[in-house]
Image (tube, helix red, strand yellow):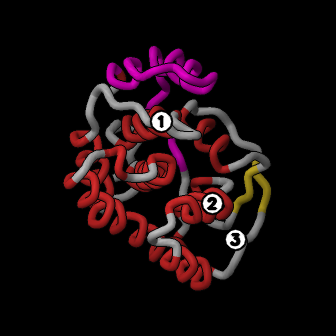
Amino acid sequence: MCERLLALPTSSDFANKLNRHFQSPNLSARWDIPETWLNSQQSCLLSLQALALDESIELSAGVPEMPRDEFYEILILAARNPEQRFVLLTTEYSFPLNFLHPSEEKIREHVLERLMVQDRAVIERKSFGAVESDDLFLRLNLIAIQAAISTDLRFIDALNYYYELLPSSWYPASQHPWLLNSFLALYAKALTPAFVNR
């Protein structure tokens, strides 16, 4: 896993930092499921980078952007609009570990189902280039976070599936290609016995 991550293009400062970090990674760092909703002082994407690098994140008490049932319904309506879904998820999860909160169970199930049914079918029929990669890898990052603390093996199975499906020479041509780098880093954490909570 680390070798594959280190072989990816270093097309951003984050990718360079991650490569240096993974030459001596701290895969034993643990996460806790938030007991209350927490807001990050930085964006969802910067927070994902911090989690992949085992960096601290400045947090404050907060509340979700909208009621959970309302957010779930809006997310369902955005099922065929990957750009809208990307904005919804990055707005809602400025602190990505909020995805672990018990209130997010229906949302986790929806994200997992989309990855393992609709997206999987498109990629198997065509290629990774047939799906919007920023949206796909954002959701894989979130699923990797869940897999690291969950006893539900469907989440780690989804990561295993996408890892095996991913061509070794492919790299996203997208606005945030580094989401592939962070996906591999968070997936590595989910596979580490000292890290996982199962």
Give the x, y percent position of residue 106. Answer: 45, 76
Q: CA distance from mark 1 to mark 2?
A: 18 Å
- The residue wearing badge 1 is 173
Q: Nearer the viewer, residue 124 or 53?
A: 124
Choose the circle earlier in sequence order: 3 or 2: 3
In the image, the segment drawn in magenta is: 3-31
Give the x, y percent position of residue 118. Answer: 30, 66
The answer to whether residue 153 is visible is: no
Choose the circle earlier in sequence order: 3 or 1: 3
The answer to whether residue 13 is visible is: yes
Q: Is residue 129 left or right of residue 73?
A: left
Asked if disc 3 and disc 2 are in contact, CB closer than 8 Å, the reply is: no
Q: CA distance from mark 3 to mark 1?
A: 32 Å
- The residue wearing badge 3 is 64
Q: Quadrant of the N terminus?
A: top left
Give the x, y percent position of residue 123. Answer: 27, 52
Which three-letter amino acid code belongs to the residue tagged 1?
Ala
Q: Is residue 8 magenta?
A: yes
Residue drawn at (28%, 28%) of the image: 168
- The residue wearing badge 2 is 87
Which three-letter amino acid code belongs to the residue tagged 2?
Val
Q: Is residue 189 magenta?
A: no
Q: Helix, strand or loop at disc 1?
A: loop
Q: Nearer the viewer, residue 12 or 140?
A: 12
